[in-house]
Structure formats: structure tokens, C-alpha cells
Amino acid sequence: MTRVFSGIKPTGHLTLGNYLGAVRRWAGEDQHRSDALFCVVDLHALTVDHDPARVRRLSRQAASLLLAAGLDPELCTVFVQSHVDEHARLSYVLECVATDGEMRRMIQYKEKAARERERGGSVRLSLLTYPVLMAADILAYGTDDVPVGNDQTQHVELARDLAVRFNQRYGHTFVVPRATSPAVAARVMNLQEPVSKMGKSDDVGPGIVYLLDEPDVVRKKVMRAVTDSGREVVYDRKERPGPANLLEILAACTGGEPAELAGAYDSYGALKKDTAEAVVEVLRPVRERHQELCADPGYVEGVLREGARKARAMARPTVDAAYRAIGLLPPA
Ligand code: TYM
């Protein structure tokens, strides 16, 4: 059976981008058709300036939202990264296989490091080694498929490269994974800045739809989305990013094709209205279920405890094998 692994970082409230690009697929075909693990990657949240209490709160919230979105602990394993030591154990060994040049070439590192420096802050070493920890997350479980949005494909490529390099040098140890992205909404853009990704830790709040936004807030944000001065509604990601983003969101929510949907509209107003309603409907069950889960924190804790137990048992043999292969003496 195909092994699937993916993760989400508790650095902000989950967005429509996270949902359409990743989480919705996890809750749909991924957990049904494969042996899947989904992880709240809290260690990754420490790579930038953070408030410890906020990271804890967001980790709980992310786990609860994954369950609210439909992840079923009977079908898949849901857990928190720091509860399973194997991630950090394997990350160190993979650092001994990766090069600093590879790390410095990562687009997300370059962007995030530049942002930290602009703010006058310093860049944490863990931001540079972030993709190695992510490779460890993936490789520890013998993962075949990694369902992610487009922004993560370079990181998954690195995980592939490290797996191949390790296997060639030290003997076959890791499955070589691949990224899978959705056909539409693989990169949902900020509604106010449709040339930038809708990111949960960004500052342009009015352009970000959060999974827990009230319906009226969602409507307001979508109705105020930036479009352009064109008269016709056409789907052109490069030249007309604002309308293209709305068409992709609408297509992802209703199951249509962005280019075909464009033909059905003669004004941006109508397109925005339908998109807003489609988003409200897609998010409604997630919000409702989340509210129920908030009333039952013991349930979420229990799921995470059991998830960590299962994940540990799955990761351990591969990580032990990697330790032996690279030359570490097994404990007596
Ligand atoms: P993160 O937390 O930024 O995002 C979680 C998932 O949501 C997708 N995503 C988007 N998809 C479409 N449009 C958007 N605007 C958008 N924003 C986010 C991401 O591509 C991702 O699939 N480094 C990862 C977390 C991670 C991970 C892993 C993922 C750590 N270890 C191992 C997979 C496997 C991250 O920061 O995702």
C-alpha cells in the first residue's frame, strides 16, 4: 500500500490555501487510498522568532482543525512532530549527507532569511537546516507520496536527492519519495496581493481567508479581492492574477475548470459573489466540527497520544537502520 506523509507548521492560523492545496486532499483520497500519516510539525515552527505559548496553542488548534477537516484517526495517523524523537534523530544523520550549498539554494530559505534580515533580526541556523528536518519527516516513514502545495515541491525534491545519495553511499535504506500537487489551487494567492502566496504567517491579513473566519468575514474578504481594470473575465494566471486566483478558488470549491468557469461570468462582481458563497460552503462543516472538538479537548489529546505511539513504532526501524548504515555503533 502506498505510504503517504505530510505536515503542517503551527506558525499561524490555517488558511484557505492550506486547505485547498493540501488538507482537503489528505482528508479525501489520501487517507482512504493509502497508509497515511499527517503531522503538526511544531519543531519547524521554532525556526523563526516565535512566542512559545502561541506555538503550543497553534499546535493544538492545527491538530483539531485537521480532525475537523475530516482526518479520521481510524484511517490515518495524526500526531505532533516533537512527540516522536525519530525526526530529530534522523535529521542529524541527514545533515551529514546534505551540503550547505544545497541549503542556501532553497527558495524558501532565501525569502525567509531576507525577511528576517529586513526586520533587523538574525537568521536562526535551524532556518537553514529546515529542509533537512523536513526530509527526515518524510524519509523516516518510508514515504512514497508527499501531498503538498506547490511551494513545498523544492523541499520534497531535496528529500529525494538525500534519499538517493544516502542509499548510493551507505546501502539501500530509504524509499525515494515524490511530491503530489492538486490540479487546481496548488498555489492559492493572497486576495489583496494576487502575485504572492496566501501564507498563514504573512502580514496582509485582509487578503487571507482563515479556516475559522466567520461567513461574513469570508464574504467581505472575497468581495474586496483585488482584480484589475479588464472588462472580460478570462483565466490567465500570468497577465490577470487577481481574477485567475478567484477562478481557481471557485473551481477548487465547486469541482469545475477555471478556464471554463471564466466563460460563465460577465462581471467580476458576480464572480466574487459566487466564489465567496462557494468558500463559505466549503468551510462551514470544518468550522462546525472544530467547535464541537473544542468542547472535547480530551478527544484530540487522545488522538495525538495514540498517533505518536503508532508513528514512533513506524519510524524507529528505518531510523535505526540509517544509524547502522552510516557507521554508528548500536547500543549494547
Ligand atoms: P505549511 O505549514 O506552510 O503548509 C501546509 C500545506 O499547505 C500548503 N499550502 C498551500 N497550498 C496552496 N496554496 C497556498 N497558498 C498554500 N499555503 C500552504 C503547503 O504546500 C503544505 O502542503 N514545510 C512544510 C511543512 C512540512 C512538511 C513536512 C510537509 C514539514 N515537514 C514533510 C510535507 C512533508 C510547511 O511549511 O507547510
Image: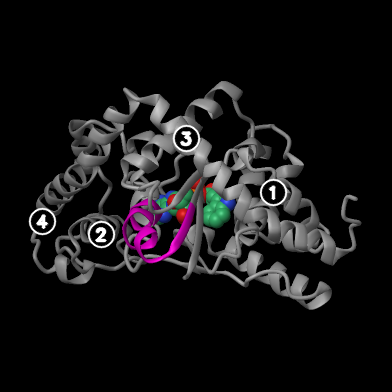
Residue type indicated by callout 4: Ser
Could you classify mark 4 by the number of other residues whose Cα lies within 10 Å: few (under 14), some (14-19), or many (20 or more)?
few
Q: How is colour applied across the structure in the image?
A: one colour
The residue where tag 4 is placed is 267
Residue at mark 4: C-beta within 8 A of ligand 1: no
Tell me if 52 is positioned left or right of 18 in this view. right
Tally of marks = 4
Residue type indicated by callout 1: Glu
The residue where tag 1 is placed is 86
User: Which label sits in the foreground, 3 or 4?
Assistant: 3
Sequence-earlier tag: 3 or 4: 3
Residue 252 badge: 2
Residue under the point 80% across and 62% down: 99
Q: Can residue 195 be seen in this view?
A: no
Residue type indicated by callout 3: Gly
Sequence-earlier tag: 2 or 4: 2
User: Which label sits in the foreground, 2 or 4?
Assistant: 2
User: Which label sits in the foreground, 4 or 1?
Assistant: 1
Q: Find the distance from the CA under tag 1 to the CA under tag 3.
A: 25 Å
Residue 12 badge: 3
Residue under the point 33% across and 63% down: 29
Tell me the SS state at disc 1: helix
Magenta part of the chain: 22-37
Residue type indicated by callout 2: Ala
Could you classify mark 2 by the number of other residues whose Cα lies within 10 Å: few (under 14), some (14-19), or many (20 or more)?
many
Position in image of residue 308 (x %, y %): 56, 42
Residue under the point 56% across and 21% down: 53
State the predominant SS element of the stretch in magenta: helix
In the image shown, does 7 or 330 lie closer to the viewer?
Answer: 330
Residue 326, quarter of picture: bottom right
